[in-house]
Image (spheres, rainbow, N blue to C red):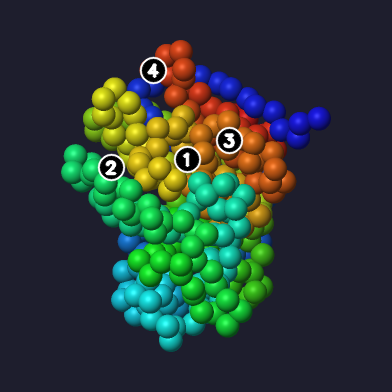
Amino acid sequence: MMKRRIYTLCILGLCLLGYVRWHHRSQEAGSPADGTYQKLQGSVFHTFYHISYQGDIDYRTAIDSLFKAFDGSLSMFNDTSIISRMNRNDASVIANDYFRNVFNKACYVSDRTHGAFDITVAPLVNLWGFGFKNSDKVTPQAVDSILQFVGYQGVTLDETGHLHKKDARTILDASSIAKGYMSDIVGDFLYANGVQNYMVEIGGEIALRGVNPSGRPWTVGIARPVADSLQQDHGYQAYLSLSAGGLATSGNYRNFYEKGGKRYAHTIDPKTGYPIQRDVLSATVIAPDCMTADAFATAFMVLGKDSALRVMEREPNVEGYLIIPSASDSTQLEVVYSAGFEQYLKTE
């Protein structure tokens, strides 16, 4: 018997993509948890973070130190980071635990998704440009030349922490997994310091545990996928109730373009080198940790609905919620999700 079922519903609207937002409603009924909740927020890694946790200690300085150490390991914008030096083929650089954990998880998800997730795809992304601003200038010859050195199978990390490449032009980019991992790192730090209840959100990727200040599981909202010319907020399509694990979303209803009557998400298929034309416009994933959720959400955007659901079937701890365009009416969207995802949906 299949472990999962597919549920479908129609969503009226002209927009294309949904995304997850942290939505804490302190007015929820229930007995408040004992103790004060700290709230920290700011910017890091070219995005924003929000952290809420139960406790009297202000961990802002310690968390800033974690951010700094992470930046020195995996930031493409830091010329002295481990990943930047490896991309320059610096033979003296050795992977630390941050780099090793991300690399190993990336390889695992790549294997499980037949290369839909690929940590070496950055040169293709750079070719097309941010927002595909270079799309009119991209030629098949340019794509083919870059595909020669794109592919996660071409890089290995040995036991001593040295990276080996089949082609010296190959570069790594952890941006599609890093925010999820950083959320895990902060959550693990809080837990190691005795914090039982927390939510850490970095750039929309969430690691959480326990209960919110109302003494209830944390509530996360999936934004209603309705966009207009003013880019206004149209509320939430669904609410999730979570007390442990990680959650991530790939896709954003403001982040697509149309050309030749076709809709393209802002994701590159590592195998073809071109923007995806799949039917998944947004993928939300729940997993035991946020790094895993982050990587699989990216892969599901590339795989498309049917292949993504098959991967969920094989991965016992990965549940997904996919927003896809309706095949019968372009003004409607449909939602499909794994049966295991249903336990997290709140009915209101």
For label 1, the SS is helix
- The residue beneath circle 3 is 307
The residue depicted at 51 percent of the width and 39 percent of the height is: 303
Cα–Cα gap, marks 3 and 4: 22 Å
Q: Hey, what amino acid is under mark 2? A: Pro
Q: Position of residue 148 (x, y in %)?
A: 38, 55
**Three-letter amino acid code of the residue under disc 4:** Ser
Q: Mark 1 belongs to which amino acid? A: Met
Amino acid, disc 3: Ser
Are dots 2 and 1 in contact, CB under 8 Å? no
* Residue behind mark 4: 330
Answer above or below: position of 103 versus 258.
below
Q: Which mark is residue 140?
A: 2
Locate residue 261 relative to residue 276 in the image: left or right: left
Q: CA distance from mark 3 to mark 2?
A: 26 Å
The secondary structure type at the circle numbered 3 is helix
User: At which x and y percent is residue 174?
Assistant: 44, 62
